[in-house]
Image (cartoon, rainbow, N blue to C red):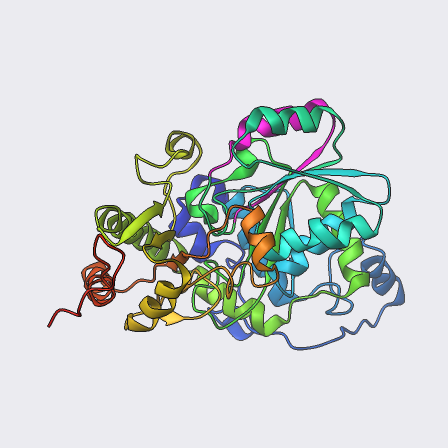
Amino acid sequence: MDFSKLKMGTASVWAGETERSYQGATTTPIVNSVTYAYDDLDEWYDVAAGKSKGYIYSRNTNPTVAVLEEKICVLEGAEATTAFATGMAAISNTLFALLSPGKRVVSINDTYGGTSKLFLEFLPEFKIEVSLCNTTDFEMLEKEIAKGCDVLYLETPTNPTLKVVDIKRLAAAAKKVGAVVVVDNTFATPINQNPLQLGADLVIHSATKFLCGHSDAMGGILCGKKELIEKVFRFREINGASIHPEAAYMILRGMKTLELRVERQNASALKIAKYLLNHDQVTDVFYPGLTTHPGHEIAKTQMSGFGGVLSFTIKGGYDQVKQFLPKLKLVHLAASLGSVSTLAGPPRTTSHVELNDEQRKQLGIPESLIRYSVGIENVEDLIADLDTALTAIKIDNTGNVAEKLS
């Protein structure tokens, strides 16, 4: 079946799962076998050498994982895919497979904290040159790319400030110097954005987030051009950052409702962002679906939906954040995002816990920022919950906390 002709919701359910499973099972089974037996040595060798399809050892490939990889391939319109144990495994394996001493990577200031750690500490230790640019200064990025670039690494919308990067424009600049373009598409998901159609060579997902959708399994995905995937796969199979088949199964199960979840989260996040924008205790709201967002026009050209994550700052700084967040009742104060239940927290305990206060400041992340990942709850209930908590910590014009209203 040609899944490219089907809508995203249909592909999320059926891609990779049209063949009958063991005993006619309609759900992809978890294949926990570590190794796979062959009676014919020539057949065994052909599979081991990659000349024929099959499985040898689950650190390399696994039947359950293969279904997950095929599903992502279809949704992102990729030639090939390989899966990892975590999102950071996907990011780090990709960078180390594509870069070596003397090579140069250009990226943006606003990347996930673990990614920033790679750029600021790990890659320089391997004599890999790193150039981090103002995220929305596309002319600066183009100039840095023109100086020489082996990998252009982008993330959009960014975590946690929701800045929007022009994928098409920067990918065109990267192609002029022969750079590989990698885009972290975790926040957007394939439902809202397809970077490969905009000029990217590789797309990364922390499958732990929206793809899984239930905060109960970890995984990472890399998809894109076949020759590049094969290069990263060779590194991954020796590095050993393989996803467990049970985690792959859990992510597969979550992906069947991906379009339904994301569409609801898109709509709810926009309503909540508009509510917060008009609240007198909120100083800034960061969500690309707002017409006031600096990246809104670019987002409209490359996204079909604006995602389920937003962030905002409140009056009073971090001290008020500590007062406000525990007053929310319909939110888990926890790391991660993209779950069916709403999650919230400040960057110092979520996206950028790996960095210190000064490093977060240099990246333009205020300590008063709250990342809010919208779940699938009723949006009116979430807004009422936010309103109650904001009222409870209300600050008057003099900067004093007003008495809690009864």
Whether residue 173 is in magenta: the answer is yes
Q: If the image is split into quadrants, where does the C terminus sit?
A: bottom left
Q: Where residue 277 sits in the image (x, y, percent)?
A: 26, 46
Q: Residue at x 29, y 70 (%)?
A: 328
Q: How many marks?
A: 0
Q: Which residues are magenta?
A: 164-185
392 lies left or right of 290: left
Closer-to-camera residue (29/180): 180
The residue lying toward the viewer, choosing from 49 and 316, is 316
- Above-or-below relation of 247 to 122: below
Query: x%, y% of residue 312?
Result: 36, 52
Report the residue at 52% width, 63% height from top: 208
User: Residue 333 sits in which quadrant?
Assistant: bottom left
List x then y, in percent, for residue 135.
55, 37
Using the image as rendered, state which of residue 238 and residue 389 is in the foreground.
389
Residue 314 located left or right of residue 206: left
Residue 108 seen in the current view: yes
367 relative to 244, above or below: above
| Residue sticking out furthest to the left | 406
Left-right relation of 334 to 287: right
Check if residue 163 falls in the magenta segment.
no
Residue 131: x and y, percent?
A: 70, 38
**Can residue 82 be seen here?**
no
Residue 77 higher or lower than 166, as above or below: below
Nearest the eye: 332 or 183: 332
Identity of the residue drawn at 31% across and 35% down = 292
